[in-house]
Image: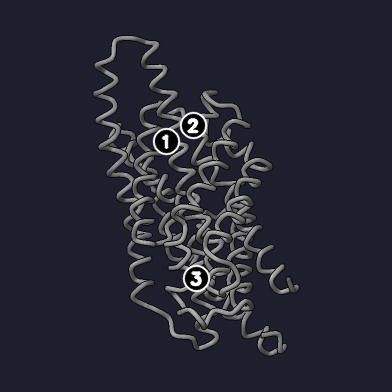
């Protein structure tokens, strides 16, 4: 394995590690915050379901990111490295500044940027579908969360046994978290491994499993604080509303997976929380809406700019 291949895999692993460190809270924050699962149990569950998702269903989104934006044969190892590096640079800058951004959108932007810099054909129809999915995903999550909240509230109101209700709460928290983790494998992992697959370096299943392992390591090593913070916030909504937000967003992401479209799990779960909040009469924090819109617009555009400039600089230096 040459130095370039090692660099590409290392950057992909770094991005997946960041996803595991931060987004694990979306999957298991509720279960850990309410002490249904310990941190170790939660991260083990995440690891299992992320690997399953990447191995069984990750190939569709990998194909879209790696081959659907810039056609197969045009994306080289150097371009894959720059696309991933650009996404990582922007996400790191945004994190330092405290800006809410999506790794998914950054990677898509990175791939577009290198394609434009090399005058490769860009599939604008695919990009249009991806953009529609970015807008529709949190909205659909909110609608589904509202429906689920009403349904499970009705079911629980019919149960008289406190012990049965408690057992149901635990089952819902674990089920919702596992489903979200499975979606990390099918969608989030696929984004990080898509450029590697598109460059023809690894097969979808091999790339998916390797990057999924990095996400699981990120969850195990660096997600503790974020998981507890998000867990406490989500638990404050109540077990049913937390599950409704989780499961509604997971269904929304699953529909995107079926279509092979990369979407943001973080933005989807925010949509679910907003939907439940509206139903409960708590109103909507306008800052949340502004944050989501910012992510839709600024992140892919910035990543496009960074990757475009980097590739041009590398070309001037004779490195690509």
Residue 167 shows in the view: yes
Of residues 158 and 298, the one drawn nearer to the viewer in this rendering: 158
Q: Write down the residue under mark 3.
A: 66
Q: Are marks 2 and 1 in contact (CB under 8 Å)?
A: yes
What is the C-alpha distance between the residues marked 3 and 1? 29 Å
Say which of marks 2 and 1 sits in front.
1
Q: Secondary structure at mark 3?
A: helix
Q: In the rendered structure, which disc, 3 or 1, sits on the residue that comes first in sequence?
A: 3
Residue 201's place in the image compared with 61, above or below, is: below
Q: Secondary structure at mark 1?
A: helix
Q: Residue 290's x, y, as percent?
A: 41, 54
Q: Residues within 10 Å of mark 1 (few under 14, many from 20)?
A: many
Q: Write down the residue under mark 2.
A: 30
Residue 291 shows in the view: no
Q: Secondary structure at mark 2?
A: helix
Say which of marks 3 and 2 sits in front.
3
Q: Residue at x 43, y 65 (%)?
A: 297
The N terminus lies in quadrant: bottom right
Q: Residue 293's x, y, as percent?
A: 40, 58
Of residues 16 and 264, the one drawn nearer to the viewer in this rendering: 16
Residue 64's place in the image compared with 39, above or below, is: below
Q: Residue at x 25, y 31 (%)?
A: 150
Residue 295's place in the image compared with 304, above or below, is: above
The C terminus lies in quadrant: bottom right
Q: Residues within 10 Å of mark 3 (few under 14, many from 20)?
A: many
Where is residue 142, by image quadrant? top left
What is the C-alpha distance between the residues marked 3 and 2? 33 Å
Mark seen at residue 176: 1
């Amino acid at each position: 394995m040459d130095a370039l291949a090692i660099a590409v895999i290392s950057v992909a692993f770094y991005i997946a590690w960041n996803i595991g460190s931060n987004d694990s809270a979306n999957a298991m924050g509720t279960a850990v915050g309410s002490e249904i699962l310990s941190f170790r149990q939660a991260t083990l569950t995440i690891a299992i379901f992320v690997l399953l998702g990447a191995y069984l269903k990750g190939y569709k989104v990998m194909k879209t990111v790696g081959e659907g934006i810039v056609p197969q044969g045009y994306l080289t190892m150097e371009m894959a490295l720059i696309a991933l590096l650009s996404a990582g640079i922007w996400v790191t800058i945004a994190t330092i500044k405290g800006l809410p951004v999506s790794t998914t959108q950054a990677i898509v932007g990175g791939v577009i940027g290198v394609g434009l810099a090399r005058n490769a054909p860009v599939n604008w129809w695919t990009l249009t579908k991806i953009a529609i999915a970015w807008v529709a995903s949190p909205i659909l999550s909110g609608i589904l969360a509202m429906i689920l909240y009403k349904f499970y509230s009705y079911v629980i109101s019919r149960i008289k046994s406190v012990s049965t209700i408690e057992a149901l709460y635990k089952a819902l928290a674990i089920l919702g978290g596992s489903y979200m983790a499975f979606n990390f494998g099918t969608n989030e992992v696929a984004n990080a491994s898509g450029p590697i697959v598109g460059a023809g370096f690894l097969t979808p299943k091999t790339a998916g499993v390797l990057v999924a392992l990095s996400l699981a390591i990120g969850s195990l090593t660096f997600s503790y604080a974020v998981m507890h913070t998000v867990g406490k916030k989500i638990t404050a909504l109540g077990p049913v509303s937390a599950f409704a937000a989780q499961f509604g967003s997971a269904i929304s992401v699953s529909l995107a997976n079926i279509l092979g479209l990369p979407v943001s799990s973080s933005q989807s779960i925010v949509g679910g929380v907003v939907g439940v909040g509206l139903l409960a009469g708590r109103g909507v924090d306008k800052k949340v809406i502004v944050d989501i819109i910012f992510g839709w617009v600024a992140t892919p555009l910035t990543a496009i700019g960074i990757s475009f400039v980097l590739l041009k600089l590398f070309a001037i230096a004779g490195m690509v």
